[in-house]
Image (tube, rainbow, N blue to C red):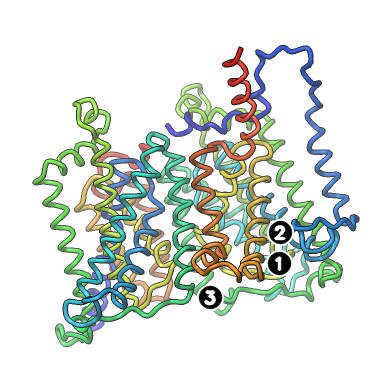
Amino acid sequence: MMTDTDVAAKAPETTEPPVMKDVRARRRLPGWTAPVVLLAVALALPFSTLYVPGLFEGTLNSPPTLHLVAFCLVFGGLATSYDLLYGRVGLLSFGHALYFACGAYVAALLMRVLELPLLWSALIAVVGGTLLSLVLGAVSLRVNGIALAMVTLAFAQAGSILISRDPGRLTGGEEGLSLNTAMVPDSFVGVFNTVNLYWVALAYAVFAVGVVWWLTASPVGRVWQGIRANEQRVAVLGVNPYPYKLVAFTVGGGLASLGGVAYLLVTGGVTPVITTAEFTLTLLVMVALGGAGTRWGPLLGAVLYTYADHRLLQLGGSDAFAALPAWIAAPLSQPLFILGTLFVLMVFFFPGGLVALPGRVRSALRDRRTART
Amino acid sequence: MSTVVLLVITGLGLGALYFLIASGLSLIFGLMDVLNFAHGAFLAIGAYGTWWAADHLPGAGPAGFGFLVAVLFGVAAGTLAATLVELCIIRPLYGRHREQILATVGLSLAVPALIQAIWGADPLTFPKPELVRGAVGVLGVNIPKDRFLLILAAVAVFVALWLFNSRTRYGLIVRAGVQDRAMVTALGIDVRKSFTLVFAIGGAAAALAGALGGLYFGVVTPTQGLSLLIFAFIVVVIGGTTSLTGCAIASITVGLIQQFANYYTVAGLGDIAVVIVLALVLLTRQGGLTAKKSAERVA
């Protein structure tokens, strides 16, 4: 079973060794400190005129920076919803892009064709995405492991083909769809209102992370933990894993379609790129990069990945790159090459992701100390 | 009638392409439980290797046997890449299936990006050798010659793999390993050597598929591999992982369904029909059409 070897199973909080009963041991901050501090920083961001050289192009509250951060946050929420399946329950789904794309495309189509206002389109898109994931999940979850990965991949591929074939000239084929701004409140349109898009993205990320954390802490989350560790055992103990897995699949799909709506607003359009299997693979990379099944891992991984993807693309076009010889500059101008290579290295040297890194460093230091004494 | 003949032969050509990819995938998956996402990368390497060799390698080119040399070069590049991937990336992660999948996922993103960095994202026209230029009349239908080349290549690979599997000692070990790896190890055979071998074979077949796929589609693109790979996955799941024949039958079925449905209904529906067939097979006969063992061992 591959779940047994999953290093990420232990959250960094629990890797704190109980053996070191040092009097100088620092007092532990209450568990809610980190989320509250982070949220406060996120809330204060649009009001700050701080300029961070190198990190962002403009001041923190300038539209390009806010747009980039909003983008990161949408993917943070999306990766968290994917981690609900992959990290929390151990379901390897390769079809998550389908539900994300469903949210984005259905909302865009409703606004464009039926000219429904944003709120109704969003509502119908999310309900539709949730139902779709419920139905497809009910079918796919009859199989396990790699077979599940294949079925979900196949369903997503069918959706991807459907969208790129442009049935009835609805989905716009390779071009995609742009947001029908007439149906969107004016406060979400235009560069000046980037800050409002930022609020949307932040609200989505907080909502997705909140739902996943809350569900994980609930009794359902306990069963998920059990399913991830050993599904057969859960079944032997008299709990049917199927409905629990279906709940995770549906909630994950619903959150993803909500993310699709947020994505549509933030980018002002949607292209078939988000329907591809490659897109789901990037989600997998984000989650594994941050640390699957951990509190902060998926969010951190997605934010870092999206940020790096954007910045590397910008750097690739910059003058500093033109000076490099072509054989170095060409591969470096491909963010996916750098991120893919980094990811392979991560899998090798830091299994468990970035979140597990402090714990590993600590334990390595402790080992050295004990070796010396 | 003539349409049916054309569709059958084109479908068989597509099925041949799927078989070339899926045979390696199914061997790798059956023996090592690795869902190899990097297979699309081997395919791309084979395709670009052939394309590059046709232009740059002395003696290679569209004329006469030059194309054969180019394909050989592409296949060699793919085989080398697959062997290196197995030795450097898969082997150290032995026994950790999820990490192995993640590593191949990383490769499947990085390698096409690297190719794109070197040769650009635009489709490159593939040199068509004189040998398969034009069409042949079969039952009154003009069929492009490259379809026959694809089918021939797939049949050759099928026969070669079948001979390897049934006549050689390594094939015996591989077959035994697919059935029960622990037992083979317990009998004192180092099954890992056959892992590298299987990866090399799979890489060679995928690279051949890349080269011939370039012929079939007329162009090569960096991301061609991944989209073909998904259908190859479907073939592997439908065909099961234990038998080469199952893989061949599934490839032909998928290729034919795709061609016919795409022609007689809306374009694109054929691809979706394949997906529906996969779902039906998985939900009714787990482990594929021919296999008795379930495909979910890895879980």
Residue B108 picture location, percent across and down: 44, 56
The tag earlier along the polypeptide, 2 or 1, is: 2
The tag on residue A71 is 2
In this orientation, does residue A119 appear? no
Q: Nearer the viewer, residue A135 or A214?
A: A214
Query: Is A253 located above or below residue A372 in the figure?
Result: below
* Same chain? Circles 3 and 1: yes
- Whole-percent x and y of residue A49? 90, 58
For disc 3, the neighbor class at 10 Å (few under 14, some 14 to 19, many from 20) is some
For disc 1, the chain is A
Per the model, the C-alpha gap separating discs 3 and 1 is 21 Å
Residue topped by disc 3: A166
Relative to residue A181, is residue B239 drawn left or right? left
Amino acid, disc 1: Thr
Whole-percent x and y of residue B82?
Answer: 32, 53
Q: On the same chain: label 2 and label 1?
A: yes
